[in-house]
Image (cartoon, grey):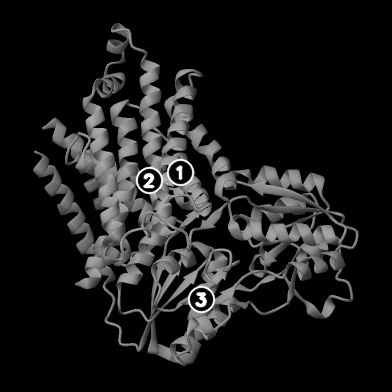
Amino acid sequence: MKKVALLIVLLAVGVFGFVILKKSQAPAIAATYTIGILQTASHPALDATREGFIEEIKSKMGDDIAFVIQNAEGSIVNVHTIAQQFHAKKQFNGFFVIATPAAQAMAAIEKERPIFIAAVSDPASIGLIHPKTNVCGTKDMIDVKAGIQMLQELLPDAKKVGLLYTSGEVNSMVLVKEMHNELKARGLIAMDFAMSSEADIQAMVESACSKVDVIMTPTDNMVGSAIASIAAIALKYKKPLIVSDNMLIKEGPLASRGVDYKAGGKQTADIALEVLVQGKHPSELPIEQIQGGQIFINKNTLDALGLSIPAALKDRVELVS
Amino acid sequence: MIELMHIAQGIIERGLIFGIVVAAVYLASRLINFDNLAVEGAFGLGGALTALLISWNLNPWLALCGSAFVGALSGVATGLLNTKLKLNNLISGIVVTTGLFSITLKTAGSNMTLSGKQTIFSAMPAFLAPYQSLLLLLLTCTILFSLISWFLKTEVGFLLRAAGDTPQMLTNIGKNVDLYIILGLALSNMFAAMGGALFVQYTGYFSIWASVGVLIIGLAGMILAQTLSPHFGVSLLIGSIAYQAIIALTFELQLNQDWNKLITALLIVLLIVIKQWLHEK
């Protein structure tokens, strides 16, 4: 009886596997280089990073580079599974890893072939930078000083700043700490609003709105996925919301002077080409900060809050509506 | 072929680590008839404590023992909530998992790297290098599973089983059922925490999000295992490895991973239906 059960299970798995195999069999790749792309989760910023990377490489190399794209959909176990499968395959010349967990897993397993990172905030703190490293690329650490400078120029009357972030995200915690120091140095009061799950968001934002003059967020994945509802609540309470990811601006926050993830992907692509084509070793290349100091402001929100852009900022601002 | 070997080795290694989590799910749900949702919290806590202790340069085996100990404590907490405060099974587990998230976060932060530190995997002799993880995990699982198999044959083990099946009998012979429920949960969470500790040492870093979805890995592994045998034993490890193989297959086929969770859900339903159908015949 047990054997029958086992047989049925194996049969089901086999049939299932065969069907998918038939459907998804990719044509043989005839490119010089193959890059394995490991993305931690589906998220607008991470998707943009991947798109920027692929676009840039395609524009320089055409079809001479092939990609194998895998997405772990937020599961750390799966990140590790994919990294291990990438490592086992000799076809890959390098790996493009998006966000911290993917970078950590890949770097822990692959010690020889180059790993290109993007959307990682603090590569040093997770042990990716050392003399023999095979890791290079960009980090998405935002310029906290410049961001708070903008906040003050835009909202000179604001005194109490609420910092909204997820308590379990390493990138957020690093930035929030830095924001605290910077706000304190400028004589502003920082208040923490740390969420631990997406279900907390509404209550947390409402509580923040009733206590502070302006809400600020770091590059935070949970904030990123719930930005529309956060922006709507902030607007209801007539509180300005400053974010750190430029792509979120069209969803309703007031302003952002943050990271352009697509540009980050492109920048990493250029670094990857230096390694693959020009033969440089990753350890010779510093991990670069993403370029750009553009300020993005949502026109509708600006009008709804009855604010205007100060003259000093005008030439650096791009309005989004 | 070598590629396939490497991939298979990875599947077996992860299968063995999560086999310990499968054992945790089994010990609670089959032995004392308690669906233990605290497994996920204990897995995270075990991983965090191991990461913290190793970052203090403590012996990695001691770190593993430390994780096992706090895991057992979290099981005692779950048991006390259930038996003394009369919270229902599922709620006790959910409450403990929720609460442990904060403790886990305070223990090791949201992310901690172990690069450059001594783990049980890096302390092996060099000539075993390509297989060191596999050998070490095989050894660990053999010891753990033998211990539990032996324990279940002792008088306490027998009474533990009875606490799940026929609690009335325990009361009749003057034994405290609550005590055995707590003991069972302590064992279950101890295993979950050891799974978490091994996973952290194996991957070389701790992430607060690693425990998300661990319960379903344990459950799927157990259900696969039970198509082989209803008893505690090697079948649990085989079930776990089989589940990791299925997940690896979905990556290998470059399936859109959006479907991953649905595949897992359908697989579990399918297996349960097959089992029930076999029972009826």
Residue that appears at 37% across and 44% down: B216
Residue position marked by numbered label 2 in the rendering:
B195
How far apart in space, not on screen, are marks 2 and 1 (Cα)?
Answer: 8 Å
**Residue B102 makes an appearance in the image:** yes
Using the image as rendered, state which of residue B186 and residue B119 is in the foreground: B119
Q: Which image quadrant is residue A251 in?
A: bottom right
Residue A260 lies left or right of residue A186; in this view the side is left
Query: In the rendering, which numbered label is found on residue B46?
Result: 1
The chain that hosts pointer 2 is B
A127 lies above or below B27:
below
Locate residue B126, reporting x and y percent.
31, 65
How far apart in space, not on screen, are marks 3 and 1 (Cα)?
Answer: 37 Å
* Residue type highlighted by circle 2: Gly
Eye-nearest disc, 3 or 1: 1
Residue B215 lies left or right of residue A167; in this view the side is left
Eye-nearest disc, 2 or 3: 2
Residue that appears at 24% across and 44% down: B142
Mark earlier in primary sequence (2, 1): 1
B166 lies above or below B253:
above
Do the residues bearing badges 2 and 1 touch, measured as CB atoms within 8 Å? yes
Residue at mark 2 shares a chain with residue at mark 3: no
**How would you rate the neighbour count of disc 1 (Cα within 10 Å): few for under 14, some for 14-19, many for 20 or more?**
many
The chain that hosts pointer 3 is A
Locate residue B62, reporting x and y percent.
42, 45
Residue position marked by numbered label 3 in the rendering:
A51
**Residue A55 makes an appearance in the image:** no
Determine the secondary structure under disc 1.
Answer: helix
